Image: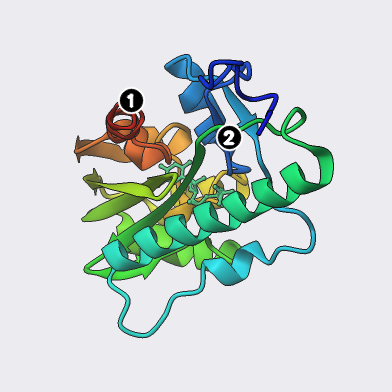
Amino acid sequence: MNTPASSADGSRLDPGFDLYLASQSPRRRDLLDSIAVRYRLLLAGPDEDAEALEAVRPGDTPAVYVQRVARLKGEAARQRLSRLQAQHGVAAWPAAPVLAADTTVALDGRILGKPQDDSEALAMLTALAGRSHEVYTAVWLDGQQRLSTSRVTWSAVPQDALRAYVASGEPAGKAGAYAIQGRAARWISRIEGSHSGIVGLPLFELDQLLTSGK
Ligand SMILES: Cc1cn([C@H]2C[C@H](O)[C@@H](COP(=O)(O)OP(=O)(O)OP(=O)(O)O)O2)c(=O)[nH]c1=O
């Protein structure tokens, strides 16, 4: 078969990027940029229910949950790529690995996802302040997975400061209602694990996946 993504001797041509990134998270894009991994976005269409993939099921531990969600995101993206290749051809959508990830925060084993509104964000932040919690990020690359687990310790934070933080808008769309790469950094006294994993894409584990496929 003659595919534009292959040379005459069958070896794969460089499509101009290293992988498809199946994520709308700007943090994941920034992290890939930081290690010079070239990506092309492969985003869910309006017909795909991204929220349904993230539903917590009875009995889920945070580790089981986050790995399932990363896998479901990755598998949905692979199907999306196949559809795009069938519609537009492999010249437009060349073969390349597909990357997906999911991040969740867990306090005493309880999953804290993205806050639905400001009051839920404040409740999450109030629970996290003055304590340690875990951040799990699962990274999925073409059917292979790695899990990054980190422990994050928050100092005690006055309620009015947490309220002001919620009002800043930063907690929206973030697991656990905070961003270690943002204003919340001033309250984090200690991390054990992976800073990039807490932000949303563990770069050591990603590199292991990228190099194990070579
Ligand atoms: C704990 C923490 C989370 N986060 C973010 C990373 C993720 O973007 C988000 C968790 O949501 P995810 O569902 O993992 O990702 P997403 O919905 O942003 O993007 P997509 O599903 O398209 O890949 O929380 C931070 O940016 N900083 C932090 O310190």
Give the structural element (helix, strand or loop) at label 2: strand
In this picture, is 45 found above or below 25?
below
Q: Quadrant of residue 26?
A: top right
Q: Nearer the viewer, residue 90 or 53?
A: 90
Instruction: Please give left or right for residue 33 compared with residue 139 in the image.
Output: right
Q: Residue furthest right?
A: 88
Q: Earlier in the sequence, mark 2 or mark 1?
A: 2
Residue matched to label 1: 214
Q: What is the count of numbered marks?
A: 2
- Residue at 39% from the left image edge and 56% from the top image edge: 104
Is the CB–ligand 1 distance for label 2 below 8 Å? no
Q: Quadrant of the N terminus?
A: top right
Q: In the image, residue 214 lies at what x, y percent?
A: 33, 25
Q: In the image, residue 76 lies at what x, y percent?
A: 59, 58
Q: Quadrant of residue 41?
A: top right
Label 1 amino acid?
Lys
In this picture, is 116 found above or below 57?
above
- Residue at 41% from the left image edge and 80% from the top image edge: 57
Residue matched to label 2: 20
Q: Residues within 10 Å of mark 1 (few under 14, many from 20)?
A: few
Mark in the foreground, 2 or 1 = 1
- Label 2 with label 1: CB-CB less than 8 Å: no
